[in-house]
Image (cartoon, rainbow, N blue to C red):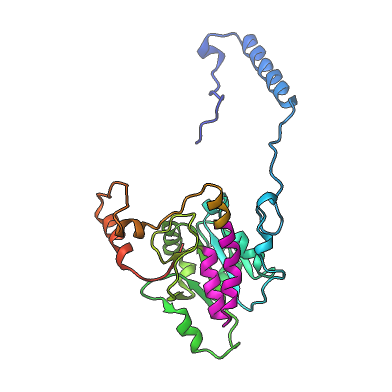
Amino acid sequence: MDHVPGFCPSVSPEENGAAAGDSSSAEDGLVDAFGDLAALPVEVGERRPTCLRCRRPQKVCLCPFLPTQPLEVSTCLYVVQHPAEESRVLRTVPLLAACLPQGKCNVIVGRRFTEEKHPELAAVCRDSRTLILYPGPKSRNLEELVRQQEVGAVKHNVIIIDGTWSQAKNMFLKNSLFHLPKQVQLNRTLSSQYVIRTQPSNICLSTLECAAVALSVLERNDDIQEVLLRPLKALCSFQLQHGAQVHHSKEHLLKNGMYDKPMPKNKRKIKRMEKLVTDHNVCPR
């Protein structure tokens, strides 16, 4: 049980040597004190006005870089988001959602997803048209998969896990629902332009970048990628102009002898860092 500040377990009058009348008076005093506190006016912190479309503060609104009208796509995205991403200021999912029609970018927050608690997501995972974007030995090349299909023959659902690489890995491994859809990965050579956050490797992409590439492949329209990346480029440019630093990937730092943190002693972590330098599967972040 969590500790409640200011709360002490009750002690009987016999145990503390106080008379019952004194105890009653003390309780009455506490009630009066809490009543006085409850009557105090509550100060509400001022929040900067937020743009309803891009979810950014109005002073740094990115709507000029969004498409005038939502992009028409047949693919439906399901972003399963780690709770920690909700509170990040520089997250990319709101920008993605702002570029797509309502219902085409569905965000579901959580760590564990079950059939009982998430029946709609479970139904999507069981749908034969659903793909999950996650690299690995069982993953198929998305472009190769699309080439084998007739144009417009299938309207896919795509699940993307939104979190740090370790969070995404943990969510994928511990949710059996995510093992039901076809597993796909991106094989395009593309360096992340999300330079204001550290990536594990040069080819790890932000959620918005993964969605941009996947949609351009599935919709057979490379213009989609350019349109979706425009607000991300503007966001990074604005942050860099106002003091943010370029965050090189861990892979870049290791290859160029710039990694200034102590190397891990754990063999598994050492192997993981070695893999950053040698593994070239495009991974979402």
Residue 117 visible in the shown view: no
**Where does residue 18 sit, x and y in percent of width and height?**
57, 9
Q: Main secondary structure of the magenta part?
A: helix
The one nearer the camera, 248 or 113, is: 248
Task: Place residue 202 in its image quadrant.
Answer: bottom left
- Residue 150 in percent (x, y) is at 55, 91
Report whether residue 272 is seen: yes
Query: Does the magenta run of residues contain 219?
Result: yes
As for residue 234 lying within the magenta part, the answer is yes
- Residue at image position (32%, 48%) is 260
Q: Is 243 above or below relative to 227?
A: above
Q: Which is nearer the eye, 64 or 30?
A: 64
Judge by depth and name the residue closer to the eye, 28 or 87: 87
User: Magenta residues, as a range?
Assistant: 207-236
Residue with the most extreme front position? 241
Residue at 67% from the left image edge and 73% from the top image edge: 71
